[in-house]
Amino acid sequence: MASSPINRISTATLSLFTALAMGACGDDEASSTADGTSTAATDSTSDTGSSTAAVTPPEASTSSSSSSGSAETDSSTSTSDDPDSSGTSEGSDSSGGEGASCDEGGQDIGFWLIQVIDGDFPNDLPTDLDESCTVGMGAPGTLRLDCPSVSFALEIPMTPAVTLPAVGTTVDTQLHHEPGWLGWPDLWIQLDYDGSSMFLQQSSQLAPNRGMLSLPWNMSESKEVCGPYEIDSPFGPDPCGAQNWLSVDFEVGGETLSVLSGTHQLLELADASFQAWVGQAREYVALPKTCDISPVTFNVVTLHTAE
């Protein structure tokens, strides 16, 4: 990788906002902002597009193994049926688990958030939910789901935009959250509707430790790691230190698609398409005690659409 600075998302800015949010945690699973929106341990803020950062790779290399000290990333077997047809991906060769190169990673492609309607996250959201919900009216880029036990909105400002189901669509909804790093909730959501399947997660480890929801597409953490990188921003160096960019592997249509942190991949199949947005999959190399942020963060969206 070239040693010249590359404009990337301001992780230092995100770290500062996340540290402030983490300070508000008080329950077994921390309380949310006043409007019920999740804003903490996944480095998610609404200001992700307002600043850029310089990325300086101290070691311009790609590791073939995961860094030590990461959170548990044991993946679960999916109950989803992959299409048997082969396909091709846009932007990269997906065969053999190949994906974006390291110098393509770290882009600001967005982070999804959840907001509990007339409630707080996570206190007013069931730990495990399996209900038939209806799509309600929402702002652009927002998917509102009205379920028998709770209503919530998913803000999904990804690039490229995620195609959302129309108002009135019935969505089979599965959801699970559990305490993650420092008690802040890790969250996984599976949505099935009209021949499409959407999966979302924001968590400090890839797979949940408990609950009924398993990872789709045989998701797993790739052995390929990019970094470490020192992130600079207008506010100064990232106080949490150097970080590695991770890749998430998906088994789709008989192929393994690897999607690097900060990238989007599209896989065209004979009778369907599969997209994955990995807004973030990163691991700090050596997190100082003064940094109240999860050592590992995943923010992922996938969409499988039958054609």
Image (cartoon, helix red, strand yellow):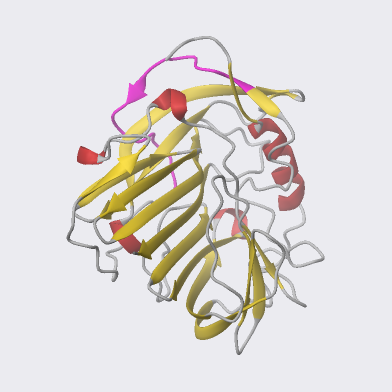
In front of the other: 96 or 45: 96
Magenta residues: mostly which secondary structure? loop
Taking the image as shown, residue 285 lies to the left or right of residue 304, namely right
Would you say residue 92 is visible in this rendering?
Answer: yes
Q: Which residues are magenta?
A: 54-72
Residue 252 belongs to the span the image colors magenta? no
Q: Report x, y in % for residue 120.
A: 73, 72
Q: Quadrant of residue 143?
A: bottom right
Q: Quadrant of residue 252?
A: bottom left
Q: Report x, y in % for residue 224.
A: 32, 33
Would you say residue 285 is visible in this rendering?
Answer: no
Residue at x 49% of width, y 52% of height: 300
Q: Is residue 84 above or below residue 289?
A: below
In front of the other: 123 or 28: 123
Q: Is residue 57 above or below residue 99?
A: above
Q: Report x, y in % for residue 110.
A: 60, 45
